Amino acid sequence: MIIKKSELETIAVKPQQYPPDDRPEIAFAGRSNVGKSSLLNLITGRKALARVSGAPGKTRTINFYNINDTFRIVDLPGYGYAKVSKSVSENWGEMMETYFKQRKGLLKVVQLVDIRHAPSAQDIQMYEYLRHYNLDGIVAATKADKVSRNEMFKYMGVIRKTLNLSQEDKIIPVSSLKKTGGDELLAVMEELLNPKG
């Protein structure tokens, strides 16, 4: 899949602000400093489609991006940042749950985890949450350039075990810095959008 057009369509906090539920959506979720904005910029080939923030926890909205006028990428609020107040983080959980429940066009949520660390309690909770809504199955392991090839397989094994992934679940190592893994992720997204058989 080649992304020729990508633009911010809507920024939403509540359902009334969502764009029409008229096309497929693939959402991205992850901890605040996991590199979500960098990954979205990598796969869309845009330098600043998603703003890379110096301050983790900045995405407090659901951002809908129009891709090729055929589907949307949805950037969900980052979770697990300590400096964000409890009431704000609870509000994000509610915001995401409402989105998961209401969007008929939502196909999958790509969960991002940092390849260098075992998934946190919040990562595990998020994956179970996705499993509950049948939105699980794809994990992007970010910052893959920070580990050697041998370590990469070891860490991917840790992620698979910690999140209790099935054999069918995919882990894709990605590096926004080295620009690797983006094509593989796009291929998986294309499969979701155009299932064979």
Image (cartoon, rainbow, N blue to C red):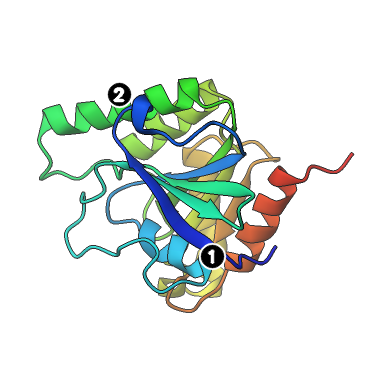
Counting from the top left corner in percent of width and height, residue 93 is at 30, 28
Q: What amino acid type should be assigned to the residue bearing mark 1?
A: Ile
- Name the side, left or right, on which 145 lies relative to 60: right
Counting from the top left corner in percent of width and height, residue 9 is at 43, 49
- Name the side, left or right, on which 59 lies relative to 55: right
Task: Please tell me whether residue 170 is drawn above or below residue 136 in the rendered image.
Answer: below
Q: What element carries label 2?
A: helix
Q: Is mark 1 on a helix, strand or loop?
A: helix
**Residue at (44, 66) in percent of width and height:** 41
Q: Name the residue under label 1.
A: 43
Q: Mark 2 points at which residue?
A: 94
Counting from the top left corner in percent of width and height, residue 77 is at 31, 42
Task: Please tell me whether residue 6 is drawn above or below residue 171 in the rendered image.
Answer: below
- Name the side, left or right, on which 14 lies relative to 84: right
Question: Can I make out residue 35 in this image?
Answer: no
Residue lying farthest to the bottom in this orientation: 178
**Residue at (69, 40) in percent of width and height:** 167
Image quadrant holding the C terminus, namely top right
